[in-house]
Amino acid sequence: MPQIVDPEFGTGCVKVTPAHDPNDFEMGKRHDLPFINIMNKDGTLNENAGIFEGQDRYVARKNIVKKLEEAGYLIKIEEYRHAVPYSDRGKVPVEPLLSTQWFVKIDPLAQKALTFLDNHNSPRFVPDRWTKVYRDWLIKLKDWCISRQLWWGHRIPAWYIVSETNNEITEQTPFIVAENEIEAIKKAQEQYGENIQIEQDPDVLDTWFSSGLWPFSTLGWPENSEDLKTYYPTSTLVTGFDIIFFWVARMTMMAGYFTDQIPFKDVYIHGLVRDENGKKMSKSANNGIDPLILIEKYGTDALRYTLIKEVAGAGQDISLQYNRKTDESESVEASRNFANKLWNAARFVMMNLEGKTPQSLGLPELEKLELCDRWILSRFHQVVQQTRDCIDNYGLGEASKGLYEFIWGDFCDWYIELVKYRLWQDANIDSRLVAQQTLAYILDNTLRLLHPFMPHITEEIWQTLTQSQEKFLATQDYPMADIQAINSELEESFSLIIGTIRTLRNLRAEAEIKPGVKVSVILQSENAAERTILESAQTYLKNLAKVERLTIIPQLEQEVGQVVAGVIGTVQALIPLSGIIDVASLRGKLEKNLGKVEAEIKSLSGRLNNPGFINKAPQDVIQGAKDALAEAQKQAEILLERLQRLK
């Protein structure tokens, strides 16, 4: 049995008020103590308070202290921090008070729910750790108080026969429980005669009692309606962990008892959106974010996508980056940029389809697919499979991130760039058609795949792409993965091609080679398989890295002069600089920049090693100096690396 009284607190004299304290109430029941209520519902004291009757509770407390002091009983007053709960809405202390209420005997309902859980793992919680929380709560339940003294709600279906107690409702007034007033009158007359007068209980049902009936009562229950037969039970309930007790358990208990079925197969517990201080957002705490502000600034899809993407895993909370002064959010802005990227890519694709739709273009012939076509199709179907697997396992955050990487990276940044030259008017007609067909197919199906995450922009683009007047993207089939199209070996090979292009672009930037200048490139690898891959991708390498002459060799057999060099796996990439840039001038510029950075490092290090600065400067100033030093050291590292590459 838990210890209720702290023996170290106060004088050691314990008062027990079973009618005004939850712990004392339990103690009073164990020891058969009398339950004496001293308070009226308006906060004044009643006749049990003796000479303090009629006084407000706050006034009475001061007067009691005054009386004790006058009688010489008051030795001293100590201040301490109490644990009396405060009302979120009223902002006043909650005063426990005995009153007559309606209760539901909870054990039959809880046992039914436990039977479903223990015998059938129903419902299944995702993540599973919430199963124990749910089960433990069902075991520890006490009878449920279902009456509330509120202005609105479902009225308690009970009527008092007030004619038996002088037309007043008292503790002794008999009552009738019935479905409606007509039935109540009939029952009352059968027991108390024809000349009766009834009055319905003014209380309303607990909100969670009414909500607990929702899964089946909304479908026509207790009638075996078509809706009930068709839609009950459902598959998934999505909710937060904070109402597992209040709502989820209420629904499983009520549904299990009345329908002998659990109302949903799975319960997916999502995280809560928390504010910058880690607190749950709520109206009462006034720490929420008005979604309409973010929607107005960034768009509905951007906000929706952010909330999905930020979910690292089922049940994990979301900390939304938000500046309350400017109503800006970096994370939602990033999602807006993603939407813009998709929009611009779609415009480019549709501009190059010559007015045709995916349906009119048809699917490309497999034997006519080029290397990058087969790669993007493999990547797409790989993402389809991953997305469906994630959704089936409630990994919505992982699914959204995978789509982001595919759309922004594979499709927009690489495939569209790789096929641009095939869309030119003087390109090979067959090659252009295959590129158009592949672009249309990928865009069409990518919009379908992304639609649950960004429904508005995808619907808008799809309507334009398909020139559909009557159909909606929301009603189309969700993509299925074509396992035959997935080629992991090809994807791995293409990673080398992409890595090589990226390295050559970086080397051009480091050497400050102008964008319009074409260069010679030497790719050296002793691995024959790597050389074969690079040979097959010469067109891509030349187009995307602005290469005029490409040489792929197993060994460097002669001196190639001054170059910038980089490594991709076991492939060495070299760009000869002779005739392209003034190497001496570039080296001098880099050395000058390095000197400035090293001077800054020396200055910052001196400040941070000075005890006077560390002991006197504000913490944010010290941290700023540390951050500046780390950034300068990184810049020096990059400059040294660039100098070393200028062989």
Image (cartoon, rainbow, N blue to C red):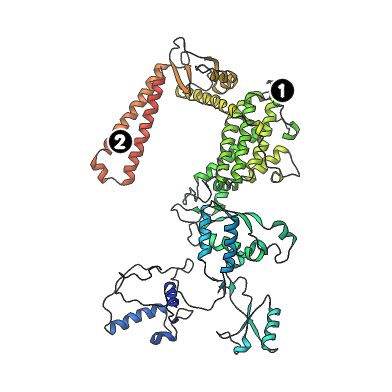
Q: Is residue 299 above or below residue 70?
A: above
Counting other residues with Cα less than 10 Å from the Cα at mark 1, is it few (<14), some (14-19), or many (20 or more)? few
Q: Nearer the viewer, residue 427 or 179?
A: 179
Residue 430 — which label?
1
Q: Whole-percent x and y of residue 150?
A: 56, 73
Front position in the image: 510 or 586: 510
At numbered mark 2, what does the secondary structure look like: helix, strand or loop?
helix
Residue occupying image coordinates x 60% and y 45%:
391
Q: Is residue 575 left or right of residue 72?
A: right
Q: For the C terminus, give its image quadrant.
A: top left
Question: Residue at the location (63% across, 82% down)?
Answer: 199
Q: Secondary structure at mark 1?
A: helix
Question: Which amino acid type corresponds to the residue marked 2 in the rendered image?
Answer: Leu
- The dot on residue 604 is 2
Observer able to see residue 352:
no
Q: Looking at numbered disc 1 in the image, what kind of residue is underneath it?
A: Asp
* Residue 135 percent across, percent down from the top left: 53, 60
Q: Which image quadrant: the N terminus?
A: bottom left
How far, Cα to Cα, is label 1 from label 2? Answer: 62 Å
